[in-house]
Image: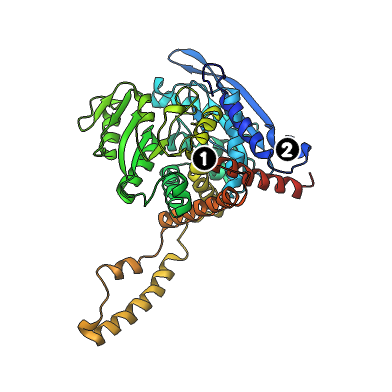
Amino acid sequence: MDAGVITEPTFRESVDMMFNRAVALMELPPGLEDKIRVCNSTYMVRFGVKLRGSIHTFTGYRSVHSEHMEPVKGGIRYSLGVNQDEVEALAALMTYKCALVETPFGGSKGGLCIDPRQYDEDELERITRRFAYELAKRHLIDPAQNVPAPDMGTGEREMAWIADQYARMNTTDINAKACVTGKPPHAGGIQGRVEATGRGVQYALQEFFRHPEDIAAAGLSGTLDGKRVVVQGLGNVGYHAAKFLREEDGSIVTGIIERDGALVSDDGIDVEAVHKWIANHGGVKGFPDATFIEDGASVLEKDCDILVPAALEGVINLGNAARVTAPLIIEAANGPVTAGADEILRNKGTVIIPDMYANAGGVTVSYFEWVKNLSHIRFGRMQRRQEEARHLLIVDELQRLSDNLGDAWSMTGDFKDKYLRGAGELELVRSGLDDTMRSAYQAMREVWHGRDDVSDLRTAAYIVSISRVADSYRAKGL
């Protein structure tokens, strides 16, 4: 493929191309295929907020791709790059992502064209509340119809503001907290939501490495222990993914790419130390325990085992795909590999774990938070102590045997403490996320290895997702 001749597809075109590649291998009625492809609606709003003595006008979007299940679900991002095409493409990805991990939502997405770093906290709150008001009064924020979440440039703080704004507008709605997910735990959120997308990336890689056939397809061997990892973007997702892979799986983070450049070290980089450095200095430049590379994008091409693009879309494209050497890429961000780059990488045998699966941890734990808000009870509250009481019966019996047998048999170390501890909310959230990531991977894997006409995980993921959306529409009589 000649990068000088072929034009790079836009993000939306990439999503459409990948959709078309999958449906070409399916037997859908043309009408149903078109119904699934198109975005149902997009609302654009322009609103004014008085700041610093004058009125500032902002442009925001909320797109609904598919209502085969309701509510629809998808984040709200704050970025100067927000536009209608991007929001609609992300909404489509949300539809397929929710279907793949079997969360009962349609796909939606929102965005505000703003650089949040240019405003202080009070100004951002006023802007966010006004945006939430404009969406909520049109039921584009609603526990039963449309449930946003954090995305690039937003987090727990913004979600708490949105939830409060909705509650002020709907004072008798007992389920008001379920209008948005990703809230702080003290404001109706759930333990484990902040880490969820990064944790999902870890669980996705763990599941991949449980299958020798899949590991071999990427030209790798062994386990995650000792694997060299390059992470692009040390925001919420990249930070947690890199941290967990390093601290819990023994992977070696040899490269970290950020806005102002990159850090490399074949001996491994302390992710926690870099995260703190960025918080204090605004970038990675000057970090003492790794080599700084001015041209951060070049580190995408660094020799490694696993490449984790975890920031913006389109970072691996026609311009650099041929030079990317990682045998395994896991898309922690939305759309980091363009459709053109995807073809180049597939042709050279690179295995790509696709975004609609790899970063589905966020929407999965958002689902748990939504259910928690609707049930009005914390996970684990009813059963935790009862589990501990049952476990204590077994431990007491084992202790009796140990006392009778003396040195011949005894319980090891901290077995008693570990076994007696019942699962709290965080443990249950992680368990549910792990189960979800395993099940979704198995569904993709069956298609990947079970069909001769499917050669990659992305196509397999689209086929699984589109099939489930089609089944939902058929059940509605379409």
Left or right position of 231 against 102: left
Residue 49's x, y, as percent? Answer: 51, 19
Left or right position of 452 against 292: right
Screen quadrant of the C terminus: top right
Give 187 or 265, whichever is nearer the viewer.
265
- Mark 2 residue type: Glu
Residue 181's x, y, as percent? Answer: 51, 42
Give the answer, above or below, for where 185 lies relative to 262.
below
Identify the residue under disc 2. Answer: 33
Determine whether label 2 and label 1 are within 8 Å by CB. Answer: no
Give 385 or 257, whichever is nearer the viewer.
257
Identify the residue under disc 1. Answer: 354
Q: Quadrant of residue 332?
A: top left
Give 26 or 151, whichever is nearer the viewer.
26
- Mark 1 residue type: Pro
For label 1, the SS is loop
Q: Earlier in the sequence, mark 2 or mark 1?
A: 2
User: Which residue is located at x 20 percent, y 82 percent?
Assistant: 407
Can residue 134 be spotted in the picture?
A: no
Give the answer, above or below, for where 232 lies relative to 381.
above
